Image (spheres, coloured by chain):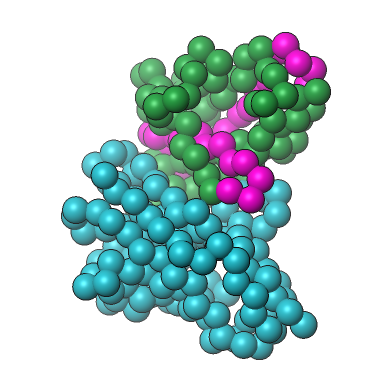
Chain colours: A cyan, B green
Amino acid sequence: AQSVTQPDIHITVSEGASLELRCNYSYGATPYLFWYVQSPGQGLQLLLKYFSGDTLVQGIKGFEAEFKRSQSSFNLRKPSVHWSDAAEYFCALMIKAAGNKLTFGGGTRVLVKP
Amino acid sequence: GAVVSQHPSWVICKSGTSVKIECRSLDFQATTMFWYRQFPKQSLMLMATSNEGSKATYEQGVEKDKFLINHASLTLSTLTVTSAHPEDSSFYICSASGLGGRDTEAFFGQGTRLTVV
């Protein structure tokens, strides 16, 4: 069965510093991978997605992610964090054969220090 | 991106009553809609998958008689929490996936905060 793991439950980063959120997946076929961000009490906003092709994916708000098949990873990065980036981040894997069913990681809460 | 509207954004109800939550795709036809439940500081748990015109498929452990899902049209799915109890209090989120270029990702509603008192 497929699974998504986000090893870090919380990350605290200083404003202006770089950020990297880890995501590992387990799936027998080529994965469709996503990163979402959720502000408190809100729905999910898509940051970026990977289906195929270039393994470095650019997203909104200055985020990027790199797909590494050999490591089964899809880590999210941002070179310089802003206070507004404080939120919960979810990595997800889509099963196309299951009607676009998403399997989510446990989430990483990002706190930004001034 | 596509727009999915969820209503209401929050609701408070008395124990024993039923609550209906609507999920609408505003600018595309949603062939598949998903309902999730999210507890505080936790990830999203898929409750069920609904396809337009057919019965919903529930995940293991989700009571289908308690969480009634209807997907009667390509733009609307509803989740009804029947005979709600305080333990049903949670954040419920829908997502939709559809036709015409909307089949490669799921678009999320804003979520509904349900509080049962």
Q: Quadrant of the N terminus of chain A?
A: top left
With respect to residue B74, does A66 lie above or below?
below
- Queried whether the magenta region covers residue A50, the answer comes back as no
* Residue B16 in sight in this render: yes
In this view, the residue in front, A45 or B72, is A45
Q: Is residue B61 left or right of residue A84?
A: left
Q: Is residue A12 left or right of residue B28?
A: right
Q: Position of residue A114 (x, y in %)?
A: 77, 82
With respect to residue B35, does B73 lie above or below?
above
Q: Is residue B43 left or right of residue B101?
A: right
Name the residue: 73% across, 79% down.
A113
In this view, the residue in front, A62 or A20, is A20
In this view, the residue in front, A25 or A96, is A25
Name the residue: 36% across, 19% down.
B54
Q: Position of residue A13 (x, y in %)?
A: 64, 80
Magenta-highlighted residues: B13-42
Q: Position of residue B104 (x, y in %)?
A: 34, 52
Name the residue: 66% across, 88% down.
A16
- Quadrant housing residue B86: top right
Could you tell me how many numbered marks the image carries?
0
- Queried whether the magenta region covers residue B41, the answer comes back as yes
Q: Position of residue B68 (x, y in %)?
A: 53, 17
With respect to residue B16, does A94 lie above or below?
below
Name the residue: 65% across, 64% down.
A87
* Residue B75 in sight in this render: no
